């Protein structure tokens, strides 16, 4: 019976504060059963379907639940249960945010409490729907990439810590079993300066719940990880110099130090929920990915590559050197790299 309960990374023993190790990928809600089977065959044990392209709640009035999206999530959970892959439930977007892929300090969501009520309502719906789905549910990711104005000041609608406590209370009124995943924010400070989400680990307050996972995303340096994406400048090399800093493995360790410090301070699980580089940057991109993964492994962090069979620019199965090579291959250097680490799940 214990073996059945612990068949994948999302099985958590709250009293021992264990979660993981999880090694897997993000994906789109278009995942078919064969996609899940193929991901499992690579050795992954977790998937985080990003429902930005199919919001679970409509982003325009009257803000109805998207039942077709929930049915799609039900199907993915069913596929993953058959192939022993855990699912992170990730709505990814919510009413009051302009973009579907991330949030911004300018979003109405951080100014209008009524927008936040809609996210509370959504999580009540999710918890009621999936509370009895067992260990196939790896966790509930509260909000993708919060980005706060005014430094996330306490007592304002931008107080992410307060909203986290409220969301946890809403979920725990229904579901006391599944892990809750909290992402650190980027912060626009009162002086206008920005702090990235790794620095945002210092902002987070530990809520009164032991069944919690903390999940920063790693896209530093952004000039490298997003070169050529939506017309951004390229090429940049890794290792290389960006913004008067020499980016190499040692610098990556320094940038991720706030995550390691938070983990050490609170003794909590860490899940690097997204990291990537454009697939066409070749050996440099794969070297970057290896460094991120090896830092995760060194610290005992779980991780999810961004992204499996979603946007072609991140797709590890497509050409690793030619942006225009959109053919999918059975083997590429990036795919073999990921597979080598996925095998650690076994």
Image: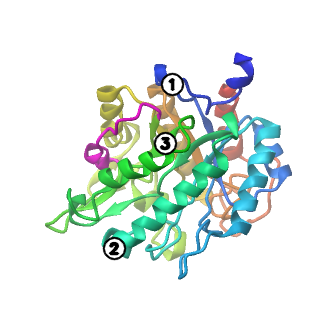
Measuring from the top left, give residue 275's x and y in whole percent.
Answer: 52, 50
**Nearest to N terminus: mark 1 or mark 3:** 1
Tell me which segment is drawn in magenta: 198-211
Which residue, given by chain and number where applicable, does mark 2 sit on? 112
Measuring from the top left, give residue 242's x and y in whole percent.
Answer: 34, 57
**Nearest to N terminus: mark 3 or mark 2:** 2
Q: Secondary structure at mark 2?
A: loop
Q: Are marks 1 and 3 in contact (CB under 8 Å)?
A: no
In this view of the protein, can residue 217 be seen by the observer?
no
The structure residue drawn at horizontal position 48% and vertical position 33%, both measured from the top left corner, is: 296
Q: Nearer the viewer, mark 3 or mark 2?
A: 3
Quarter location, residue 322? bottom right
Which residue, given by chain and number where applicable, does mark 3 sit on? 172
**Nearest to N terminus: mark 1 or mark 2:** 1
Residue lying furthest front: 173
Measuring from the top left, give residue 65's x and y in whole percent.
Answer: 62, 69
Q: Please tell me whether residue 115 belongs to the stretch shown in magenta.
A: no
The local crowd at label 2, few if under 14, some if 14 to 19, many if 20 or more residues have their Cα within 10 Å, is some
Residue lying furthest left: 191
Disc number placed over residue 161 in the picture, else none: none
């Amino acid at each position: 019976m214990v073996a059945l309960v612990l068949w994948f990374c999302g099985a958590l023993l709250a009293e021992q504060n264990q979660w993981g190790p999880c090694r897997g990928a993000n994906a789109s809600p278009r995942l078919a059963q064969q996609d899940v089977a193929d991901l499992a065959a690579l050795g992954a044990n977790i998937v985080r379907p990003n429902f930005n392209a199919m919001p679970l709640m409509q982003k325009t009035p009257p803000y109805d639940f998207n039942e077709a999206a929930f049915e799609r999530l039900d199907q993915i959970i069913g596929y993953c249960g058959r192939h022993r892959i855990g699912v992170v439930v990730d709505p990814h977007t919510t009413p009051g945010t302009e973009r579907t892929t991330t949030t911004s300090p300018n979003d109405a969501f951080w100014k209008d409490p009524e927008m936040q009520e809609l996210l509370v309502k959504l999580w009540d719906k999710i918890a009621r729907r999936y509370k009895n789905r067992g260990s196939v549910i790896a966790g509930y990711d509260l909000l993708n990439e919060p980005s706060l104005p005014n430094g996330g000041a306490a007592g304002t609608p931008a107080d992410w810590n307060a909203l986290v406590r409220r969301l946890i209370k809403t979920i725990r009124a229904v579901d006391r079993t599944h892990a809750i995943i909290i992402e650190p924010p980027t912060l626009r400070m009162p002086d206008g300066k920005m702090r990235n989400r790794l620095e945002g680990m210092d902002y987070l307050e530990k809520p009164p719940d032991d069944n919690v996972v903390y999940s920063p995303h790693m896209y530093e340096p952004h000039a490298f990880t997003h070169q050529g994406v939506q017309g951004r400048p390229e090429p940049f090399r890794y290792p290389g110099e960006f913004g008067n800093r020499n980016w190499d493995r040692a610098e990556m360790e320094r940038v991720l130090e706030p995550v390691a410090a938070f983990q050490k301070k609170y003794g909590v699980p860490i899940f690097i929920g997204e990291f990537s580089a454009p697939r066409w940057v070749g050996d440099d991109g794969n070297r970057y990915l290896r460094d991120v993964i090896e830092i995760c492994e060194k610290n005992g962090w779980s991780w999810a590559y961004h992204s499996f069979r979603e946007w072609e620019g991140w797709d590890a199965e497509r050409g690793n050197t030619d942006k225009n090579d959109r053919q999918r291959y059975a083997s590429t250097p990036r795919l073999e790299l990921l597979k080598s680490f996925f095998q650690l799940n076994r």
